[in-house]
Amino acid sequence: MKKASNLLICLLFIFCSKDLTTGETEDILIRINSYTQSCQGLIEQQCYLVQQGDAIGLENWTLFYDEIEGFDFIPGFVYDLEVRITERTPVPQDLGKYKYTLIKEIRRTAAD
């Protein structure tokens, strides 16, 4: 369980390139792969595979444990999204420090 907690903390740092303070937001571009993968956060779940910023278009994908409010994932498509990150204050128990909200679906491409 400690290993999963450490991984979740690392992912929060990866996906939040600057430290947001109370109520602050940041908009980012992310790419979501065409399928999800089993992962272990607080519970076993399905995670998105994502790329962010300069990593978009490279071979490496990172597990994303959170939900993106307003985003409806359909397997078989790769998505390029503009997402807003907002710090939750106070942080609810069993949820991440940040809330992710879809601003715009930039592109949806059928997977090869």
Image (cartoon, rainbow, N blue to C red):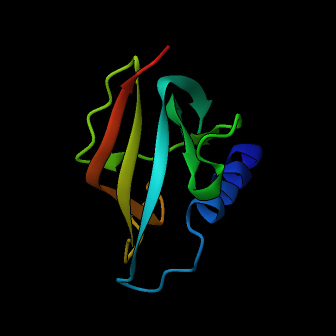
Between 27 and 47, the one nearer to me in the picture = 27
Q: Is residue 93 left or right of residue 6?
A: left
Taking the spot 38% from the left edge, 27% from the top edge, the residue there is 109
Taking the spot 43% from the left edge, 56% from the top edge, the residue there is 95
Number of marks drawn: 0
Q: Residue furthest left?
A: 70
**Up-down: is 50 above or below 39?**
below
Q: Is residue 70 left or right of residue 79?
A: left
Residue 58, position as x, y percentages in the image: 68, 40
Q: Is residue 33 left or right of residue 92?
A: right
Tell me the quarter of the picture where residue 91 sits. Answer: bottom left
Tell me the quarter of the picture where residue 80 sits. Answer: top left
Between 94 and 13, the one nearer to me in the picture = 13
Q: Residue furthest right?
A: 3
Between 27 and 69, the one nearer to me in the picture = 27
Between 45 and 63, the one nearer to me in the picture = 63
Residue 27, position as x, y percentages in the image: 40, 68
Q: Is residue 69 left or right of residue 18?
A: left
Taking the spot 48% from the left edge, 42% from the top edge, the residue there is 31
Quadrant of the frame with the N terminus: top right
Residue 52, position as x, y percentages in the image: 56, 52
Taking the spot 45% from the left edge, 62% from the top edge, the residue there is 28
**Up-down: is 97 above or below 56?**
below
**Up-down: is 72 above or below 30?**
above
Residue 102, position as x, y percentages in the image: 29, 53
